[in-house]
Image (cartoon, grey):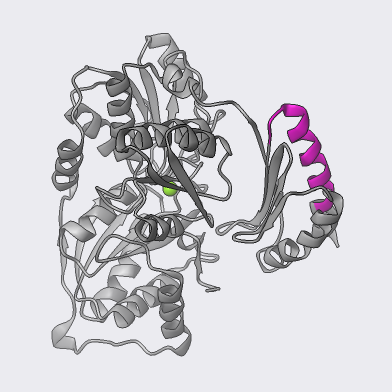
Amino acid sequence: MSKLFGSSGVRGIVSVDLTPVLTCKVASAVATYTKAKKAVVGKDTRVSGNMIEDALVCGLQSCGVDVFLVGYVPTPVCAYATKAYGADVGFMLTASHNPAQYNGIKVFNGNGLSLTDPQQLAVEKVVVENRYGLADWRELGSTTASDATATYIKMVNDSVSLKKKWHIVVDPGCGAAFSMGPALLKSLGCKITALNAQPDGYFPARKSEPSVESLHDLSKAVAALGADIGIAFDGDADRVAFIDETGGFVNFDRSLAAYSGYVLKRSGGGIVVTNVEASMCVETMAEKYGGKVVRTRVGDIYLSEAIVNNGAVFGGEPCGAWIYPQQHLCPDGLLSAAMFLAALEDTGKTVSEFVGEVPEYITLRENFACKNDAKYGVVDQIGDLLKTVFSDYIEFTTVDGVRLSLKNGWLLIRASGTEPLIRLTVEGRTLAVAKDITTKATALIHKQVEA
Ligand code: MG
């Protein structure tokens, strides 16, 4: 596995892991490896965004790459612009949902697809071997500022049209969708009330990861205003979260399962792709509408690959990152918002009715601090111990971390691709089952982390 790249590109704490020097090297290495002539560069609203952008652009220009700067945009807009502009490569400077001190570099190929693992390794090799294809001083790259907004909004409006004037409370959380989120929903004819729609890289209003806690204000606003729906994005808006018409937070697994069921019903079956962390309610809904579920490792690149390889109609991770292969292959929170509204309109249902069709299993998630250099080893060692503790297990897989299927639920233990954490996910048909599995697994993880 690459040391520089995690499951979502290069990411780390600014001035500790991610420095301008490293950024410049990564940019030159990507340019050298891909032989790119034209690049698109976007950024989220983080305090370090301008500095990291300057370093990145410097590395690209030094290798003769012409750069189109699309400014503060969501990740899917940057990915879409990379393809739409006919660029060879795209760079999104973001640390997604991570706290304000982080930043990162997400790299797309000319189709707007994240670089694959082998491609990332090849880029890393250029950095390690320090062999950059620097351009002659007369052939250095240029920079051009460009607005990608209109191109992207047209794509969504070509894909979705709404008849109803939905009243939406939208919460970009001061992140990359601060302008585009409200603008896109307005372009679809919706009535918008916006919260936290000023750009602020300190994320003062809420954490950039959407959750019940971080979307508390949005829930209250939806209920108080009697709005139809609340829509929130993570820091770079490749993820979406919904609040129903009563102000209730919609569980990520259930919205994913409900939408998967809807797409399969509309397309008369087919394949949906999700990752090993998603609830078994996705299978329940897929089976109901004659479809099949393919599960991948966690990380949107693996979903995109599996969507292409299986000819899937839709794919999504239970963090709210949903992919629509007919539009493009980058998870897209903004497009998801539009598509979800269209599905509600098509079925004539409210948010709670739409999601209410999905059975409610109990999912519990816990994170355990564990150093980056130890986390993969801990997970590797824990498999055999798990099989001893849960001796009546039905299936054991290591597609990503270790996953055990049990009679009335399952558990997954995996190392985070972006943070010094081990993540435990447990699902049970009842709360008692889920709690029992969690207690046993937690004890085991603590013992291994401390060992
Ligand atoms: Mg994100």
- Between 186 and 94, the one lying in front of the other is 186
Spot occupied by residue 38 in the image (x, y as percentages of width and height):
19, 71
Can you see residue 204?
Answer: no
Q: Above or below — where is 344 with respect to 38?
A: above
Residue 21: percent from left, percent from top:
42, 74
Indicate the position of residue 377 as horizontal and vertical percent values: 72, 68
Q: Position of residue 188 (x, y in %)?
A: 19, 28
As displayed, is residue 182 above or below residue 24? above
Q: How many marks?
A: 0
Identify the residue at image location x=78%, y=28%: 432
Q: Nearer the viewer, residue 29 or 321?
A: 321
User: Which quadrant of the structure image shows residue 200?
Assistant: top left
Q: Is residue 57 left or right of residue 195?
A: left
Q: Tell me what residue is drawn at x 18 percent, y 87 percent.
A: 137
**Residue 251 covered by magenta stretch:** no
Q: Quadrant of the N terminus?
A: bottom right
Q: Residue at image x 16%, y 64%? A: 86
Answer left or right for 434 relative to 214: right
Q: Residue at x 31, y 27 (%)?
A: 343
Q: Is residue 443 magenta?
A: yes
Residue 255 visible within the image: yes
Please state the extent of the stretch shown in magenta in the rendering: 428-444
Which of the 4 image quadrants contains residue 179? Answer: top left
- Residue 255 vs 19, above or below: the answer is above
Q: Tell which of 256 and 263 is nearer to you.
A: 263
Report the magenta stretch's main SS.
helix
Image-quadrant location for residue 422: bottom right
- Which quadrant of the figure contains the C terminus? bottom right
Whether 249 is drawn above or below 438: the answer is: above
